[in-house]
Image: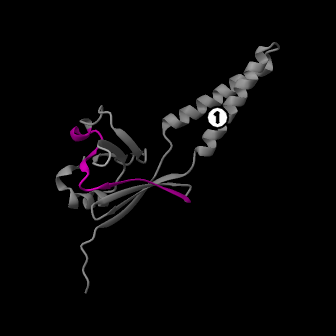
Amino acid sequence: MFESNDTFVEDSVKVVETAQDKTRKLGLMAMCLVSLGGFTVMNNHLKYIFLIVFIVMMIIDLILIVNNKNVEYEYDYTNGSLSIAKIIDNSKRKELLTVESAQLKMVAAMGTNESLKYDHVKLKTYDCSAHNEELKDYILVAHNEEKGYDFKVLFTPSDKLLTAMERYNKRDIYRG
């Protein structure tokens, strides 16, 4: 029988709308209502300024509502290579990045001593996490040899994915 030592893990997480996103939407809606109220109350030239502000706020609200789509991140780990893709409305797929095991410097649970080392370091950041309080987020730090800089990825891996990553980078994975 054929035996394979290949490692393949596919994992996906659905992004949850954060409290900050909800607050931003409510604030824009409140500003829209205030500008509409100002438009109806005013009788002078300020009335038109409130009308313009109302129209701009409505356009911003519509853009935020339309862009608030069903977003998922898919993590594919194959033989030491982690690929992350963004899936929008279960139809549009966009490859974000691929990290090879040789590029990996560290994977640590958020809030651990290892992750806090990179908290205030200015690195290019890819936020691919679920923003779900019930799931544990991790930080991945890697080095891009071609471009010559480090970057970090915020993501929400499963235990199965972390176990597969430990197979190739045992010393660099810190579970919290």
Q: Residues within 10 Å of mark 1 (few under 14, many from 20)?
A: some
**Residue name at image x 36 percent, y 39 percent:** 124
Q: Position of residue 140 (x, y in %)?
A: 30, 47
Question: Label 1, on which residue?
Answer: 60
Q: Quadrant of residue 116?
A: top left
Residue sitting at the far left:
171
What is the span of residues highlighted in magenta in the rendered image?
A: 91-115
**Residue name at image x 27 percent, y 37 percent:** 118
Q: Is residue 133 above or below residue 85?
A: above
Q: Is residue 169 above or below residue 59?
A: below
Quadrant in which the N terminus appears: bottom left
Q: Position of residue 11 (x, y in %)?
A: 39, 60
Q: Quadrant of residue 10?
A: bottom left
Q: Is residue 168 above or below residue 124?
A: below
Q: Position of residue 176 (x, y in %)?
A: 25, 46
Left-right relation of 122 to 69: left
What secondary structure do most residues of the magenta stretch adopt? Answer: strand
